[in-house]
Image (cartoon, rainbow, N blue to C red):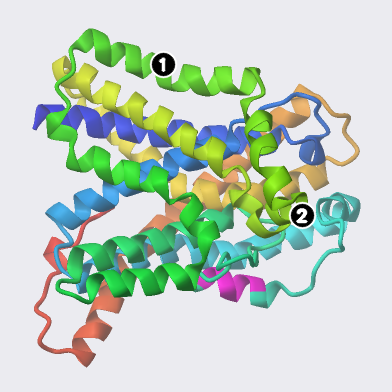
Amino acid sequence: MRLEQSFSQYLDFFRIAAALIVVADHAFLPGMTGTAIKFPFGADSVIAFFILSGFVISYVADRKERDPVTFSVARLSRLWSVLIPALLIAPCFDFIGLHFDPALYEAWAPQGVSGHWLPQAGASAFFVNEIWFTSLSPQFNTPVWSIGFEFWYYVLFAVFVFCRGRFRWPILALIACGIGPKILLLMPPWLLGVALYRWRARITLPTAVGLILVLAGPSMIVLGHYVHGLDRLRALYIPLLGRDFVYSDLNEARDFLWLNLVGIALTLHLAGVFAVVRNWQPALPTLTSFIQGAAGLTYSIYLLHFPAQMMIAALLHDQPPGLPKIGVVLAGSLMISAGLGYFLEKIKSPLRQWMMQGIRNILPTIRNRDDELPSS
């Protein structure tokens, strides 16, 4: 139990670090703040979230959400509690930003600022924004794309875990055909998170070996960027698949080779952490509570920081590029998204209870499981 508590605390820290890296990556974009500084770790941190998701979903299915109804309600309420408000709040930020600096938004959307907000928001709300080779994620809130991937990983996992008998594999194949190859290309890191949870008890590495893995995982990613590993891997398949197909059709999955290697490196890092924290004492309750609270806001930060950054950058359109402008965009977007997240997190439990009550009204045989539903 001490081992799992210590590892859980590190996972919260890992989640916070991943969110901050994504926010920083977008703040350093030339189109956002005009900087020439390269910070190429944003997509890598999305893969970190995928690994964490696979680990956590395996945990809750094993310990708390042991039937398909409880699992589905808990997952949907968690996703929708922030996603739906984010899809409604982001256009308000866009409206303000467009008033002060329409050129910023036009440069971000070279084909023109789209007025089709409702189809994009609707597709994202029902997780069909990235099916096959479509990309209907909101124009000025690109991080939403990953939710359109992650939801289908939940679905495939739930079918595999809860569906028994001869229909399991045909259903999995049917869903895979329905969502298309783009989403499946980035599923291996999510499955690595599942494997890390399933095999965690078998990680009996010496502490020294664990420490090597802790350091080696992130180091391999940094070194890979330094030697232009991403460009080298692209050169392997772009001639075969075509540049237009890779950049337009695959879109956010265009770097699938690199991102799957990142998933392996980060999984090795977490396996090393699991070996190292064996001798740790759990942090003090006050520190634990603070880390858990901050980690609980990362979903809101992830989905709201980008439109907040666009708005702040538009407000600062007459300021010269540089670290002060980056700092304001970075800090301001964090405060706005975390502040909104504090209130959005309170929607989760009532939404979950309302959804469960609605299902009970339709299927009265489902017994009360409110006390079993997880808080995460």
Q: Magenta region's main secondary structure?
A: helix
Q: Residue at x 76, y 49 (%)?
A: 243
- Tell me the crowding category of disc 2: few under 14, some 14 to 19, or many 20 or more residues within 10 angstroms, Cα based: few
Q: Which residue appears farthest toward the top when viewing the image? A: 208
Q: Position of residue 205 (x, y in %)?
A: 18, 18
The amino acid marked with disc number 1 is Ala
Secondary structure at numbered mark 1: helix
Q: Position of residue 146 (x, y in %)?
A: 52, 54
Along the line of sight, the residue nearer the viewer: 89 or 261: 261
Q: Is residue 223 above or below residue 285?
A: above
Q: Which mark is residue 9?
A: none
Q: Which residues are magenta?
A: 120-125
Q: Residue at x 87, y 53 (%)?
A: 100
Q: Find residue 175 and report its image quarter.
A: bottom left
Q: Is residue 18 above or below residue 71?
A: above
Which residue, given by chain and number where applicable, does mark 1 sit on?
A: 216
Give yes or no for residue 122 being in the magenta stretch. Answer: yes
Secondary structure at numbered mark 2: helix
Q: Residue at x 66, y 27 (%)?
A: 39
Q: Is residue 264 above or below residue 63?
A: above
Along the line of sight, the residue nearer the viewer: 54 or 22: 54
Q: Position of residue 368 (x, y in %)?
A: 11, 75
Q: Is residue 139 above or below residue 271?
A: below
Q: Is residue 51 left or right of residue 197?
A: right
Q: Position of residue 2 (x, y in %)?
A: 11, 27
Q: Find residue 330 and report its image quarter.
A: top right
Q: Which mark is residue 244?
A: 2
Give yes or no for residue 31 being in the magenta stretch. Answer: no
Total labels: the figure holds 2
